[in-house]
Image (tube, helix red, strand yellow):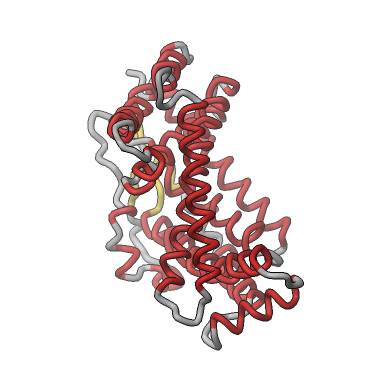
Amino acid sequence: MKKGQPRFNYFLNQLEVLLAKSSKQKNPGLWLYQNNARTPLFMLEALAKLYAGIHNKKKFSKLKDHFKLLEDSIGAIDYYDSFAKDFLANKKIPKTITAYLQAQSREKIQSLNEILIEKEWLGNNNSRIKKIRKKLETAGWLNEEDDLKSIHSFYISAINKILGFINEKGFHFENVEADVHELRRKLRWLSIYPQALQGCIQTTKAKALPKYLEKYLTKEITGSPYNIMPGADDSKHFLLLDKNRFYALSWLIADLGKLKDNGLRVVVIEEALLQTTKTTNTDALKKTYQLLGNKQPKLQQLLDNAESTCKIYFKEKNLELLIVGTAAV
């Protein structure tokens, strides 16, 4: 049995339904943003990214670019819209800043609407889904056993690339976006692949729980639906991950996410000030901290916190020990 194409079809079907509904709206891009089209796009991007590393690299790389363009476009809307809504409730933030963020959000929505037509997701020639399905028909899909072996190798490679990234940085972060956010993106794919692959990756508990892992097993993490693996269904070959270390991975992603969001609050206000007033970078940053108040950590403090957290996590070799092995039934 070949599992690859059905995995794509599962999320393509979800996306197709959303696109069809959005086409009946006055503002399709806004509707897709508000109705979580980003999730199936994340899954499709993950599958394309993974299979580009397994076989048919050129074919799947092109598919990944299509999914990523839409996902990034929705992400750009979310970036400005979320901060705009957050700052609306803060009376210390000038209306000119929230107005700038709202304008940027509208601009990104318009950009998405243009992409939807230009790339043939919507409009008179809405043939993108059909073209993708046609490409998938001609991919050299592997049988389930060989497919799982390749997924195993790819997952190891993804982990090694993260270790290479962190070793290159030497646990020294200088930029919220280029360092903290980029590391979080790389880590997050490790948690997205199991969801996208729909059951061939499962978790298993070790007999003994190392004491140092206990700090990661919070109720928020162990109770998260995102940490429940999809059902195995009729799969017969599996990649097994250590459950507690998968929780630890999830904890790190969440913690870096909080630090990243806190840092981007500074970045986005500084951007708004530079775009709406005649000021220098130094003065804009100083004004940003004044607007956010004493409770807002400085960027360097957030970077230092991210460094400390990562030093502990990576020195415990949690990623190296994440994969338990493979199994067949």
Horizontal relation, residue 327 to residue 45: left or right: left
Quarter containing the C terminus: top left
Residue 125 x %, y %: 43, 17
- Give me the residue at 58% from left, 23% from top: 57
Residue 33 x %, y %: 38, 46
- Give me the residue at 51% from left, 56% from top: 103
- Residue 311: quarter of image: bottom right
- Residue 10: quarter of image: top left
Horizontal relation, residue 45 to residue 276: left or right: left
Tell me, yes or no, if residue 329 can be seen here.
no
- Give me the residue at 37% from left, 35% from top: 197
Vertical placement of 178 versus 285: above or below?
Answer: above
Q: Nearer the viewer, residue 242 or 175?
A: 175
- Residue 193: quarter of image: top left
Tell me, yes or no, if residue 218 can be seen here.
yes
Q: Nearer the viewer, residue 278 or 74?
A: 278
